[in-house]
Amino acid sequence: MGFIGGIWLALLGVLAAPNLLLSRKPEARQWLDKIAPYQGWIGAISALWGALVILGALLNLRWLRHALIYWVTYAADGVLLLCLGLLLGVGVLKQFIKAPQAVEKMDQTIARLAPKQGVLGIVAICLGVWAVISNFLWRIG
């Protein structure tokens, strides 16, 4: 996933669970208010990126043999990017999807994911930080 991907995932987690950040740092509201108008686009890009990461993880199952932790981190990053991207970018994505069945399927998926948004956000923050740390560990070690 890398350094940039880890930061992106942590940012996505903060956008998905803003109450966690605001309870610890109330002054962060100004920063969140500045980025909130772009939340839909950040989510849409994340959903597409997550789908590509999941595809990459499936195409590289051979990594399981030699780099299990890296592959699990990579696949989990993709799943979180896709899920949180759908949750945050559903409005933008619906602008581009014209098929009624696809929109209905997306609404069903969002309905299932919405109650878990806070938990997914917290996990995304943790996994994003881990992706940044592991990027240094595997490059140095």
Image: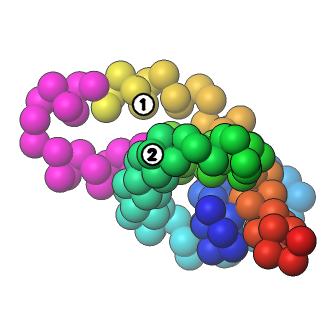
Name above or below for residue 98 compared with residue 8: above
* Amino acid type indicated by mark 2: Leu
* Amino acid type indicated by mark 1: Ile
Q: Secondary structure at mark 1?
A: helix
Label 2 or label 1, whichever comes before in sequence order: 2
Which one is in front, 72 or 27?
Answer: 72
Residue 82 appears in the rendering:
no
**Which residues make up the magenta segment?**
84-105
Which one is in front, 6 or 27?
Answer: 6
For the stretch drawn in magenta, what is the main secondary structure? helix
The disc at residue 59 is 2
Residue 116 appears in the rendering:
yes
Name above or below for residue 133 compared with residue 24: below
Which one is in front, 41 or 79?
Answer: 79
Circle 2 packing at 10 Å, graded few (<14), some (14-19), many (20+), is few
The color scheme shown is rainbow
Please provide percent x and percent y for residue 11: 65, 64
Circle 1 packing at 10 Å, graded few (<14), some (14-19), many (20+), is some
Residue, x 59% and y 26% (percent of image)?
115
Using the rendered view, name the quadrant where residue 1 is placed: bottom right
Q: Secondary structure at mark 2?
A: helix
Please provide percent x and percent y for residue 99: 10, 35
Please provide percent x and percent y for residue 62: 58, 44
Residue, x 17% and y 52% (percent of image)?
96
Name above or below for residue 120 compared with residue 48: above
The disc at residue 110 is 1
